[in-house]
Amino acid sequence: MKRLAISIALAFSAVLAGPVAAQTATTAVGTAPGMGTAAQTVKFTATITAIDAATRDITLKGPKGNELTVTAGPEIKNFANMKVGDQVNVDYLESLTLELKKGGGLIVQRTAKDGMAGAVPGAKPAGAAGRQVTIVADVVDVNAANQTVTLKGPKRTVDLRIPDAAQFKQIAKGDQVEATYTQAVAVVVEPAKK
């Protein structure tokens, strides 16, 4: 299950690295007292121009004519149902939320959840994979001069600058911060448009 998520993420990264696909990106940032969130979504589409069944290589072409070849690993089901001319649509989400936990009391730890889903047999290839990592850290120091807090997590200690003065004033030594990082990608192959 983890290999498929890595394969999808690598294929996504490879496509984004080159100017192959039409892309749209949306970024959102929000704050509330003791909380901050940043999220980004990226969508892109490419057209399959070649398929090598022996190597499982798929060549993708963007609207400007640029091409990129990616390899579909054995975990990609329904590979034989892809055809030249089909569209590959990818949606990617990444977000980070920080939440202040006044007075602490939570266990300092790191937890991770993974999930994935694939296409039903006989359909065009499709899949979705996601990962959410949550870290709880103790606030061990507050530096008003630099407007930074020192957070001690389960594996390391980091200094975090808090640029918002109103948010910074809420934080005290002994509080905790819960950080949740989420990544998700969905890939859908659709028949060629006629």
Image (spheres, rainbow, N blue to C red):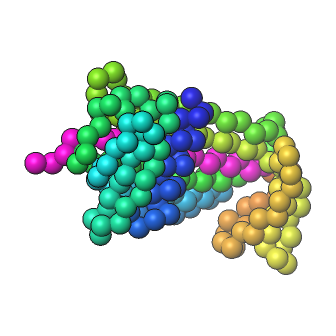
**Magenta stretch: includes residue 37:** no
**Horizontal and vertical percent position of residue 9:** 53, 47
Is residue 51 found left or right of 143 in the rendered image? Answer: left
Name, please, the residue furthest toward the front.
Answer: 54
- Front-most of 34 and 138? 138
x 75%, y 39%: residue: 110
x 55%, y 59%: residue: 38
Q: Is residue 54 visible?
A: yes
Q: Is residue 169 visible?
A: no
Is residue 122 found left or right of 131 in the rendered image? Answer: left
Name, please, the residue furthest toward the bottom.
Answer: 145
**Horizontal and vertical percent position of residue 96:** 60, 54
Name, please, the residue furthest toward the top.
Answer: 121
Name, please, the residue furthest toward the right.
Answer: 140
Q: Is residue 52 above or below residue 152?
A: above
Image quadrant in which the N terminus is located:
top right
- Front-most of 165 and 71? 71
Q: Is residue 87 above or below residue 20?
A: above
x 65%, y 53%: residue: 98
Magenta stretch, residue numbers = 176-194
**Horizontal and vertical percent position of residue 8:** 50, 43
**Horizontal and vertical percent position of residue 92:** 45, 51
Q: Is residue 19 above or below residue 43?
A: below
- Front-most of 58 and 28? 58
